[in-house]
Image: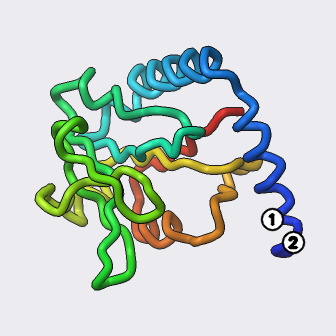
Amino acid sequence: MNSDEKRALRQDFLARRAAIDADARREADRRIREAVMGSAAYRAMRCVALFATDGLEPDLLPMTAMDGEKIFALPRYVAERKCYELAIVRDCATELVRARYGLLEPSAECPALASELVERETLHLVPGVAFDDAGVRLGRGGGFYDRLLEHVVSPVWGVYYA
């Protein structure tokens, strides 16, 4: 698929997502959180990597207040390395700040999640504009998640409104 086709697909799926009304979005968010938290993969993993919604993506952050046993981490941009890392968040109300692209991410005070945990003991929940039947992700085009998850062998799940 060429870049023009990807751009057209992104525009189409983003427009569909924007058309979801607030009540339907909240109900879908609740169902997504319940499905994730009820899964065997969730129970088996020590950590869960989430993302902060851009306002049109599913809202997973309430999960952090619903489970005091898991380690939760979110992506944080590291300017010196020009990449993202996962950082541990214990309290979303006080530890998230507006950062790159206006998204919420862990503050500088939040510790980075150890690479061994990232790669082997974390259920990764990643946003996508769309996913095909094989699970191939259509993102925003920056490749940030591709690089972040390059060495991951633990489960990676795409989360989006179908």
Check if mark 2's residue and mark 1's residue have beta carbons within 8 Å. yes
Near-viewer residue (22 or 106): 22
Q: Is residue 72 left or right of residue 84?
A: left
How far apart are labels 2 and 1 at the CA level? 5 Å
Residue 142 place in picture, x, y as percent: 58, 71
Residue 111 place in picture, x, y as percent: 13, 59
Residue found at the very far bottom of the displayed protein:
80
Near-viewer residue (88 or 120): 88
Q: Which residue is mark 1?
A: 7
Q: Is residue 151 above or below residue 119?
A: below
Residue 130 place in picture, x, y as percent: 71, 48
Seen at 20% across and 41% down, the residue is 71
**Number of numbered labels in the structure image:** 2
Using the image, tell me which numbered label, if any, was put on residue 91: none
Using the image, tell me which numbered label, if any, was put on residue 4: 2
Seen at 34% across and 54% down, the residue is 98
Residue 91 place in picture, x, y as percent: 18, 37
